[in-house]
Amino acid sequence: MKFLHISCFIMCILCSILCQQGNCEPVEDKEVLLEFVKKFPPSRTLNWNESSSVCDFWTGVTCNEDRSRVIAIRLPGVGFHGTIPPFTISNLPALQILSLRSNFITGFFPSDFSNLKNLSFLYLQFNNLSGPLPDFSPWKNLSVVNLSNNKFNGTIPLSLTNLTQLAGLNLANNSLSGEIPDLGLLRLQVLNLSNNDLHGTVPKSLQRFPDSAFIGNNISLGNSTAVSPVNAPVYEPPSVAEKHGRLSETALLGIIVAGIVIGLIAFGFLMFVCCWNRRKDGDDDDAFVGKLNKGEMSPEKAVSRHQDANNKLSFFEGCNYAFDLEDLLRASAEVLGKGTFGTAYKAILEDVTTVVVKRLKEVAFGKKDFEQYMEIVGSLKHENVVELKAYYYSKDEKLMVYDYYSHGSVSSLLHGKRGEERVTLDWDTRLRIALGAARGIARIHAENGGKLVHGNIKSSNIFLNTKQYGCVSDLGLATISSSLPLPISRAAGYRAPEVTDTRKAAQPSDVYSFGVVLLELLTGKSPIHTTGGDEIIHLVRWVHSVVREEWTAEVFDLELMRFPNIEEEMVEMLQIAMSCVVRMPDQRPKISEVVKMIENVRQIDAQTQQSSDQNQAGLRLSSQHDNDNDKSPSCTSSPLPKGTE
């Protein structure tokens, strides 16, 4: 018996190790999903097969962290026809998100869905489901329910009042009847019951929602304002002309004057439109997503404006996202920033997936060349390079889709608002940022036969990954764009001298830009900034002048000076940065060499630690070309790993 217990314990450990290495598979859930598509095949081919990994490669499928269960199914618009086969989807006990919207699903709401006790997000809108709404009691964790644009009838069930976590409810465009129950859901933020056959009054607990949530019903609001099922024609009394049969001279003169005024207004409006259409970018960036957020543009109209025929989002192999352009345009969005090559948006999809959408401007490539280059960029997989998940190309719009990094960019962490809530980037974190970014750039430079160039290295394009290492974003934008930073812009401060002359980036210019980022991490200053007297300061020139005067310690960020025993490492990093920003491209090190230099910055040797006085004595550089042969690091923290973290 004891041996059996030990064997079971060893098996559990082995299973845990296998799962951590990415070999774990939710076997039962995989069989359920294969059975589901076998009985309910979509018209659009899915890359679901027994030989591939559910968690890594199956479109629309997301697993939990230990890869033991499927927690999300997102298959919008894949062409499901008919009734959902029973005891298929419902046999996924850990399922939290289910999106089968925009298909051709018929029949009643599946009764066996009551087995999905962990369901939090349910999207079945734009199908042909009919019959009464289900009993919502089994789903205590539901946060969002969207059953709009179906054929449901009957009353709104009182069981909805049990959903204390419910934040969004959309039952619009069905055939629901009866009165609206007093749901009393305090967390409810979004409600849409429009275009049904409901009657009565709106309960007090729901009167906080706008009239548009109830329009298209025969109901009245708490203030007795009627909400009609249709927009009834407005009755107008007979005109004077109808009474008397002809117009008076005064009326005729008024009509002529009004006609002239209207003509002038129309002409002025046309002139305004012509001038407006000539404007580029600017407010159009905000309108792209902002109108959707405010409900000023329906998703259908937005898609018709921004999607050419037969064009759709192109996803890369291994991406388990399952949304389309319509989802993207429907998403809640905010502008993250406007850069040299376009505007970045944070988009939160209906299933709470968050992505970053880069809307490009002034793309110099045609569709074929653009797609070929995207394939090169999208094929690059590295933990220190932000992965391109999808792209979109049409005559009017070019989009790139990335994962969202919640920690923010290095630029925002360094130069964001300074206050009590701001967290200072300590030296360990800055070292990890530098090392991770260098490794990412080295991987980029090794791609495409060693010919790939980033072309836009800057702190706002470097993010912190889950391990708190630097991760490089916006690969490829400089190559496909014809834009160039303005001479006085912050982005211009990263630009190597030769790029200013030739307008063409190369790998040595990437090294220069990375050197500026290193100086940014060391000094806490922007690459181009102004003094109190509005004097423009270029970071590279300023550091050169300070080092020349042998006041090296004055270079470093004051926020770093409160951390003990790091001066030697900062000096070494400063030397690396200065070697990267030398004026002649052929005198700069390759990025692979820079990686090794940064890895060697931190070396632990407790027996040869120097005192603080010795460290201070080492804070002088004769020039940026010193070899510094007598290094004796004094840091007492843990060493940075060498190689891929």
Image (tube, helix red, strand yellow):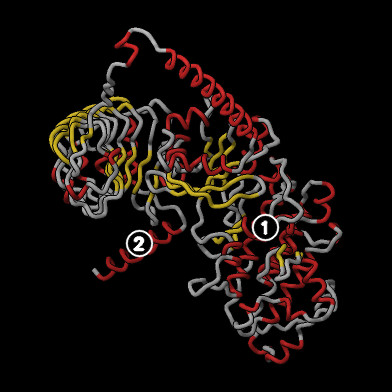
Q: Quadrant of residue 224?
A: top left
Quadrant location of the N terminus? bottom left
Say if 280 sits above or below 12 in the image: above
Q: Residues within 10 Å of mark 2 (few under 14, many from 20)?
A: few
Determine contact: label 1, label 2, CB under 8 Å.
no
Q: Residue at the location (32% across, 42% down)? A: 98
Q: Check disc 2 and give the amino acid type.
A: Met
Q: Nearer the viewer, residue 378 or 11?
A: 378
x and y percentages locating residue 396 in the rendered image: 59, 31
Q: Residue at the location (43% across, 57% down)? A: 18
x and y percentages locating residue 389 in the rendered image: 53, 44
Mark with earlier residue (1, 2): 2
Say if 405 sits above or below 539 in the image: above
Secondary structure beneath disc 1?
A: loop
Q: Nearer the viewer, residue 170 or 204?
A: 204
Q: Quadrant of residue 553?
A: bottom right
The answer, for residue 95, to whether it is visible in the render is no
Q: Residue at the location (63% across, 32% down)? A: 275
Q: Which residue appears farthest toward the front when viewing the image? A: 249
Badge 1 is on which residue? 458
Left or right: where 260 falls relative to 156: right
x and y percentages locating residue 317 in the rendered image: 52, 40
Q: Which mark is residue 611?
A: none
Quadrant location of the C terminus? bottom right
Say if 121 sits above or below 602 in the image: above
Badge 2 is on which residue? 11
Q: Nearer the viewer, residue 630 or 209?
A: 209
